[in-house]
Image: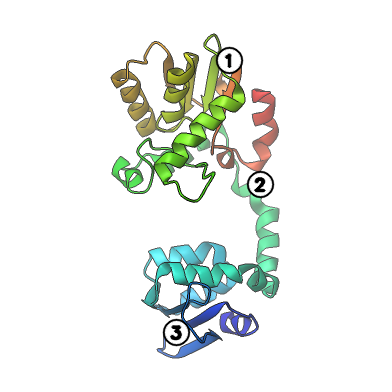
Amino acid sequence: MLFSVLRNISLKGKLDIIDFNGKTHSFGAFSDLTSDNPYSKIRFTNKSIQRKLFINPGLYLGEGYMNGEIIIEEGTIEDFINIITSVYDDFISRNGIFKFYGTILNFLKPLHQINKIVKSKKNIEHHYDLNEKLYRLFLDRDMQYSCAYFHNENINLDQAQSDKKKHIINKLNIKSDMNVLDIGCGWGGLSLQIAKDTGAQVKGITLSKNQLATAQKRAQEEGLNEKVHFALQDYRLEKNKYDRIISVGMFEHVGVNYYPTFFSKTY
């Protein structure tokens, strides 16, 4: 079924897929190998990945590559991604089973996102309380997890994350006499930057013990203990009022059933 859908799509470039039985399936074509007309050959190492990609490519494409179910035989991972992403919407529109699957998932999403306080803590621990070396492999030097601000294509990740923090601070017009709450403060970088740039009092809250330990250590090392306080705490348990509230890249953890709770608490 996966190959049937791919045959009806006009690929930008050429993609060869070697299935689990060793048979090669070719899609698209190219005359000259260029960045606008790439070539990639991949191999499936088991039979199930073909079915999984048909049902939910958005999930299993990345997982399949990470798990070794999809092997890049020729071309680069960038070539493969460029070919796939250029026709992803077309693939989805032609895949009735995926659309049906997506409808069911959307209907069940509130059940999947039950996010009471105890469960929230377990979810965050599962995701973030890992060896910090893992995150240092792909994050910037300040350990910012999301929402980098690439205002032009010539800057690197470190600069983009630094620009993000400055952009947020400037937009919120934070002053030295203000109290600021950072919900989902991560490893503390934004909270510390606010204190350094504005002199405001900042409280950063997280549900990750590892993140809390790192954030507290950074505050101590940078001499900001009097300006920045970090706590292991759910936002729903916060009692104080603040002049500014910041939450960057945390909203996906809230859960659709808890959006009203989040906004009633923060507004």
Query: Given the image, on which type of amino acid does mark 2 rest?
Result: Pro
The answer to whether any part of residue 58 appears in the image is yes
Query: Given the image, on which type of amino acid does mark 3 rest?
Result: Asp
Mark 3 vs mark 1: in front: 3
Q: Secondary structure at mark 2?
A: helix
- Asked if residue 103 lies left or right of residue 204, the reply is right
Q: Secondary structure at mark 1?
A: loop
Whether 167 is drawn above or below 32: the answer is above
The answer to whether any part of residue 232 appears in the image is no
Instruction: Give the number of marks.
Output: 3
- Image coordinates of residue 240 in percent, x first then y, are 58, 13
Q: Which residue position holds label 3? A: 19
Residue in front for this viewpoint, 71 or 100: 71
- Image coordinates of residue 152 in percent, x first then y, are 52, 47
The label shown at residue 110 is 2
Mark 1 vs mark 2: in front: 1
Whether 27 is drawn above or below 160: the answer is below
Q: Which residue position holds label 1? A: 239
- Asked if residue 224 lies left or right of residue 102, the reply is left
Whether 50 is drawn above or below 88: the answer is below
Mark 3 vs mark 2: in front: 3
Question: How far apart are the two marked residues, 3 and 1, measured between alpha carbons?
Answer: 57 Å
- Asked if residue 237 lies left or right of residue 199, the reply is right
Q: Quadrant of the N terminus?
A: bottom right
The label shown at residue 265 is none
